[in-house]
Amino acid sequence: MRRVLRGLVAALALIGGGLAVDAAPAAADLPYGPYTCKSGYVWREAVPGDYVCVLPSQRTTTQGENALGPSRRQPGGGAWGPDTCASGFVWRESRPSDHVCVPPASRARVRAPASSAARAAS
């Protein structure tokens, strides 16, 4: 759809003469396609295939949570099977399959960037 709109704007610029447009690069022109982050942002990588763009410090925090996750599970499992979190921890849920146990504030932090991902082609 973007390519169609860019083509239409380019055609109008030729016809109308003087219409200047500074269009964002097409996703195909970006180093990682539509998953390219804006400068200063990196992929969160909470789970494989997690291409939400966040600040590098947020990715570092996420990597730390991944490392601590197993120690925050209920020993022997519980109501949610072997992924049941110990008291005071919840699943991060960056995706439905993300069962890393984190403090509730971390889950809230992870959910926020999903709606405002910093993509280069946005």
Image (cartoon, grey):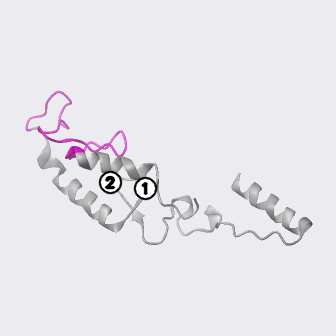
The structure residue drawn at horizontal position 36% and vertical position 39%, both measured from the top left corner, is 96
Q: Which mark is residue 35?
A: none
Rate crowding at label 2 as few (under 14), some (14 to 19) or many (20 or more) other CA atoms within 10 Å: many
Q: Are marks 1 and 2 in contact (CB under 8 Å)?
A: yes
Q: Secondary structure at mark 1?
A: loop
Q: Report the label total.
A: 2
Residue nearer the viewer, 95 or 55 = 55
Distance in Å between CA atoms under marks 1 and 2: 9 Å
Q: Which residues are magenta?
A: 75-104
Write down the residue under mark 1: 52
- The amino acid on which the numbered mark 2 sits, given as a three-letter code, is Ala
Q: Secondary structure at mark 2?
A: loop
User: x and y percent of residue 106 in the render?
Assistant: 25, 50
In the displayed structure image, the side of residue 13 where residue 87 appears, left or right: left
The structure residue drawn at horizontal position 56% and vertical position 59%, both measured from the top left corner, is 34
In the rendered image, the vertical position of residue 108 relative to residue 45, given as above or below: above
